[in-house]
Image (cartoon, rainbow, N blue to C red):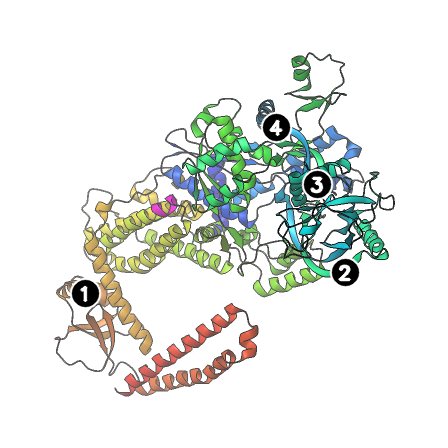
Amino acid sequence: MEKTYSPHSIEQRWYQTWEDKGYFAAQGTGESYCIMIPPPNVTGSLHMGHAFQDTIMDALIRYHRMKGCNTLWQAGTDHAGIATQMVVERLCDAEGKTRHDYGREAFIDKVWQWKEESGGAITRQLRRMGSSLDWQRERFTMDAGMSDAVQEVFIRLYEEGLIYRGKRLVNWDPVLHTAVSDLEVLPTEENGSMWHLRYPLSNDQGFLIVATTRPETLLGDAAVAIHPNDERYKHLLGEFVELPLTGRRIPIIADDYVDPEFGTGCVKITPAHDFNDYEVWTRHRHTSAMQDLPQGGLINIFTINASVNADGLIPAAYQGLDRFAARKQIVADLEAQGLLEKIADHKLMVPRGDRSGSVIEPLLTDQWYVKVAPLAEPAIAAVENGDIKFVPDNWKNTYFDWMRNIQDWCISRQIWWGHRIPAWYDELGNIYVGASEQAIRTRHNLADDYPLRQDEDVLDTWFSSALWPFSTLGWPEQTPELAQHYPTSVLVTGFDIIFFWVARMIMMGLKFQGQAPFKEVYIHGLVRDAEGQKMSKTKGNVLDPIDIIDGIDLETLVAKRTGGMMQPHLAKKAEQATRKDFPDGISPYGTDALRFTFASLASTGRDIRFDLARTEGYRNFCNKLWNAARYVLMNTEGQDCGCGDAPCEFSQADRWISSRLHQVIDATCHAIDHYRFDLAAQALYEFTWNEYCDWYLELAKVSLQSDNPALQRGTRKTLLTVLENVLRLAHPIMPFITEEIWQRVAPLLGITGDTVMLQGYPKADTAQIDQQAIAEIDWLMQVILGVRRIRGEMNIAPGKPLPVLLQHGSAADQIFVSNNLVYLQRLARLETLTWLGDSEAAPESAIALVGDLRILIPMAGLIDKTAELARLDKEIQRLKNDLPRVEGKLNNPAFVDKAPAEVIDKERAKLAEMHSMLNNLEQQHTKISAL
């Protein structure tokens, strides 16, 4: 093995070997264990959330592959309708063209060309993370098989009356000219205004004051609502107000939606441009006051560009104006007519499109919908009866809350890239749904020259994603893969898409397969930065996983984090934070250290704070494992390692480390089985670093340097056996370093096989656990640590042999001393070891306790009393000088009132530590003075 651990020299080499040899493919035997990757956007690049999630999935897949399961981790990407179309439209824009210049067919060809040339970035990055996906089965949501599945589902749902076309409110992006899902709308807190408007009562008895953040929408008002129990306004029910600027009258209605405490308690109702107002309208549309209004009160005032339309109900002065220009003009006109009460500053959440950045407009449009309620009922039951289990369990409540209040799903999008809706129209407005135009003509006996035109819209990307668990396995064909791997084992995903993806997959799986698509849903937290802030490009605090693996210099990192930021003051702030947090850029840590960091953070919490200091610690862990392996190989290669017929003798230390190994195997398996990767990582780390490397390798030297060949063989065999088990145990989390070391270790134990990833996962054997050995070595470690602590406290040189006295020991203590004398002498550096009688007077000594056993080290002659007292005086004086500064800061109201809580807590902890240190030093001074 190389002297220094260098992840870059091994990682990509091993990944290429694994992929070339087909190790990632389902083996075809054993119980199925299948995970569907949440398909990343084909336009995307790997972010920390992907890397975290993929580490968890890969750990599960590698773990179950080693346990003998027929594992399939289904690979694939999503066509990402809006995002991909925007990328290609920008390319057209660079040519001075629009998609309309190309025409639909040529533009789609251009998208496919882009996908082939540039769409594989994220799959290359997944490989860098060590993800053992079955690339031979990679799918794309627009490939032919997936398109067949999408079309089949649409047609069947339509024929069952579960898909319909209707006019309803949607989130409309006026830049992209399409409906978008709630997930694609980013509520952004912005400074705005609250306009208080006067709506005159039609009986000339005054006016109602209505507060609104969108005065331009009064052009589409259908009513003014009050709370039914609001005593201020109850007497006005049944009356009308004159809608300013329009010449129309609208009714005053009562509805529980109104919060009498907010604003004036009077709410303007604009049903065609506000989701809540639309719901109010549906509850009142049957009333004569509403039915008598033009268009039944449902007045659409905007075009698809979010400018005021030319409807005859709208005053000509506003027609054609952009919505924000209309706002300005309407406010001016209201003020001129004395109908503007006041304008107040107001912070509000503005819905912006995540792709275009434009303000999303609720708009009344014709769209295709899935009637969801009949599909939701069995999907709710599947979780209630335990067919699907959420981990952690509390997330089922989030799922139930949404499913029990579910709305019909808008599935049409007004773009070109995607699955085109398989619906055709004739000139009379009849709708025909089928697999193709020819199939429709045949089924409906329509002549070849009978005019038909296909719907221009495409399906929401989430529609094809909802079919992912079974369409990827070949459905609608009944393939062997579908029979073998459906339902899948677990879905690993974030809580933010429980509604948009998880619930819809459950509904579609139950509908078209008769079974839930997965048995468990593991919901992980959101990766945040070290301060707990959400990582976002606008904050400039994003970390690229590949930069953590490969390293990046400071200037490139600054440019990467601030490039493209539109607001200069935010870019400056991001630059300052980056230079402060990463003064030397980011060192290359390698994939294994990053994966181990993610595993250590994978608890049951909602949020995950990612701190590079942890990754640095786990890079050190990789170094520790590498150096331990080199030491073991130096002591075993070319030696008799106990694999032949010669007898082996095992020391108590050998039996102890073997026993602890089986306990750690049990703990690790239990943790992974229950999705507690943090506990698995902790068990592996503590055993490998603290017990195997720090203790056992030292204890083993005693046997290796003995004159007993059988004992040497036993220890060599134990060194190798435990290390080989650790490598298999850690492989699902750290695949590269474990493969590299295993290739050298396994042959020494006579183990055959081309790769560690296809070896069996270690199994705990309780018969191998020797509790006596565990108790005895635990005792030994406590005694050695007690002696070492005294050395440290008394500033005694580590190599100086010490006379040690023992007192008040039990019969077991005396046996342990006798059994482990050689270890005590070697590891604690003892000169002599003497038992004192229980009542025998001891000289002035430093004392450590192990249970009732007193470990005494006489101080006389061990230290230079004068020099040590001088050193202690200096340390005591330094602390006494520093204490008033920290105490003064905490007693200063200006600091305590303004400083963040974590800063104050840090100062208090520092003060407590200083007091503790001072107390210890003064006690030490008293002891040494008495010598």
Q: Amino acid at mark 2?
A: Lys
The residue identified by callout 3 is 86
Residue 875's quadrant in the figure? bottom left
Q: Are marks 2 and 1 in contact (CB under 8 Å)?
A: no
The residue identified by callout 2 is 342
Magenta range: 669-674
Query: Where is residue 194 shown, x and y percent of the image?
Result: 72, 57
Circle 2 or circle 4, nearest the eye: 2
For residue 821, the mark is 1
Point out the tag, 4 or 1, that comes first from the N-terminus: 4
Query: Where is residue 185 shown, x and y percent of the image?
Result: 65, 46
Query: Where is residue 865 shown, x and y percent of the image?
Result: 30, 86
Residue appearing at x 69%, y 15% in the figure: 441
For residue 163, the mark is 4
Residue 373's quadrant in the figure? top right
Residue appearing at x 19%, y 48% in the figure: 648
Circle 4 or circle 3, nearest the eye: 4
Horizontal relation, residue 585 to residue 26: left or right: right
Point out the tag, 2 or 4, that comes first from the N-terminus: 4
Q: Tell me the CA gap for discs 3 and 2.
A: 42 Å
Q: Quadrant of the C terminus?
A: bottom left
Query: Where is residue 33 shown, x and y percent of the image?
Result: 41, 35
Predominant secondary structure, magenta span: helix
Q: Tell me the CA gap for discs 2 and 4.
A: 47 Å
Q: Amino acid at mark 1?
A: Leu
Q: Please determine whether, in this image, residue 362 is positioned above or below residue 232.
A: above
Tell me the element at label 1.
Answer: helix
Residue 151's quadrant in the figure? top right
Q: Amino acid at mark 4?
A: Ile
